[in-house]
Image: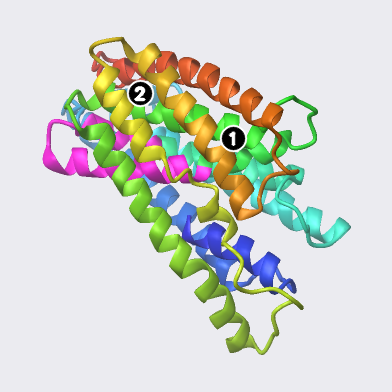
């Protein structure tokens, strides 16, 4: 996450790039560490099962037998490992893409969207691992860290829909969907009042850290390698942290108040309404809206946020219930 925010700001403020810039190394190191950790756990669990031990589903999720039973992988680590391996594959495709077409000036090139998606899959595995340990203090804290990371990162893939002509802001709608879904999922999976607010507070803290770190890192790294900023650049809001809704914690309060009384779908719809209204205004004020926001745009995006919020609440409750299951799963 740090590497991606840094790299995006580097492209905006500085420009010149190679495959082996420091932000790129941060990005690839993140997936490499996740992939290696997952591989180690899978090998350890496989060895333990061959000794006759039964895998504990609280350690990474239910155990899944893969490759004809040759390996046993806790669900969370399997998802993370697959995401990390796919990321490295698409990294090679991205390297080839840059060699053919040069370095991208946009986020929504095909290899970039594939890379963002595979990183999100890696982060989903981390959420599964954290939720599996929800009965322990570390599991609850890990959930409140892994879920906001996924909230921060997953909406980046919405850039793939920028070219689609819809009557509402697709970035706002997709961001609303994933944030509501994950807040409701956290509330349903952990089952403790206040966990959604704690998760949103952690998201706000991550936003503050990235807001300070990202422009500083871009300028400091440019000075270190002797490159100037682009003319007229510097001082604008950093792109990635600006893409996090400031009102997410308000949406979390609405979810906590309505989760039991009105059900997760209604809670998600109200939270989506809040995010749809406030986030489109936030993007307009910060200068990231695709065009000046009109009253029609505001109404359409707010309604879209409410509808996507309803969907997010519905799916979040069901995904959260799934994370609470501990039956044996085989494949």
Give the residue at x 44% y 21%: 68
User: What residue lies at 55% left-to-right and 65% top-to-bottom?
Assistant: 6
Q: Residues within 10 Å of mark 2 (few under 14, many from 20)?
A: some
Q: CA distance from mark 2 to mark 1?
A: 36 Å
Image quadrant containing the C terminus = top left
Mark 1 Cα shell of 10 Å, populated few (<14), some (14-19), many (≥20): many
In the rendered image, residue 270, in percent from the top left (x then y), is placed at: 41, 21
The label on residue 58 is none
Q: Is residue 240 visible?
A: yes
Q: Magenta stretch containing residue 133, yes or no?
A: yes
Look at the image and give the residue range highlighted in magenta. 125-153
Pick the residue in front: 308 or 190.
308
Question: Does residue 325 show up magenta in the picture?
Answer: no
Residue 329 showing in the rendered view: no
- Image location (x, y in percent) of residue 125: 40, 36
Mark 1 and mark 2 in contact (Cβ < 8 Å)?
A: no
Residue designated by label 1: 172
Outermost residue toward the right in this view: 100
Q: Residue at x 63, y 31 (%)?
A: 298
Q: Secondary structure at mark 2?
A: strand
Which residue is farthest front? 295
In terms of secondary structure, what is the magenta stretch mainly? helix
- Rendered view: 16 above or below 110: below
The residue that disc 2 covers is 64
Placement of 286 over or under 225, stated as above or below: above
Q: Is residue 171 left or right of residue 149?
A: right
Residue 248 in the image, given as x and y percentages of width and height = 40, 38
Query: Closer to the camera: disc 2 or disc 1?
Result: 1
């Amino acid at each position: 996450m740090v590497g991606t925010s840094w790299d995006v700001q580097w492209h905006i403020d500085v420009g010149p790039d190679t495959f082996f810039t420091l932000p790129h190394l941060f990005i690839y190191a993140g997936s490499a560490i996740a992939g290696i950790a997952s591989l180690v756990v899978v090998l350890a669990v496989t060895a333990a099962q061959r000794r006759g031990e039964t895998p504990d589903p609280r350690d990474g999720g239910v155990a899944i037998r893969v490759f004809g039973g040759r390996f046993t992988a806790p669900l969370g680590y399997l998802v993370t490992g697959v995401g990390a391996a796919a990321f490295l594959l698409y990294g090679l495709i991205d390297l080839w893409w840059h060699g053919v077409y040069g370095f991208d000036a946009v986020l929504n090139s095909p290899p970039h969207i594939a890379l963002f998606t595979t990183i999100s899959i890696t982060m989903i595995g981390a959420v599964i691992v954290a939720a599996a340990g929800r009965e322990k203090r570390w599991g609850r804290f890990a959930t409140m860290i892994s879920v906001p990371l996924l909230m921060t990162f997953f909406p980046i893939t919405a850039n793939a829909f920028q070219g689609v002509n819809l009557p509402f802001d697709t970035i706002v709608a997709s961001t609303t969907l994933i944030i509501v879904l994950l807040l409701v999922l956290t509330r349903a999976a952990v089952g403790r009042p206040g966990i959604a607010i704690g998760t949103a507070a952690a998201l706000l803290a991550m936003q503050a850290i990235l807001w300070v770190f990202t422009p500083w890192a871009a300028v400091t790294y440019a000075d270190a390698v002797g490159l100037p900023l682009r003319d007229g650049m510097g001082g604008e809001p950093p792109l990635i942290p600006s893409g996090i809704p400031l009102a997410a914690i308000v949406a979390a309060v609405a979810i906590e108040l309505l989760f039991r009384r009105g059900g997760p779908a209604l809670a998600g719809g109200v939270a989506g309404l809040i995010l749809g209204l406030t986030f489109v205004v936030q993007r307009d004020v910060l200068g990231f809206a695709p065009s000046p926001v009109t009253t029609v745009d505001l109404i359409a995006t707010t309604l879209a946020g409410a509808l996507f919020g309803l969907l997010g609440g519905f799916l979040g409750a069901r995904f959260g219930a799934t994370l609470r299951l501990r039956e044996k799963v085989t494949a």
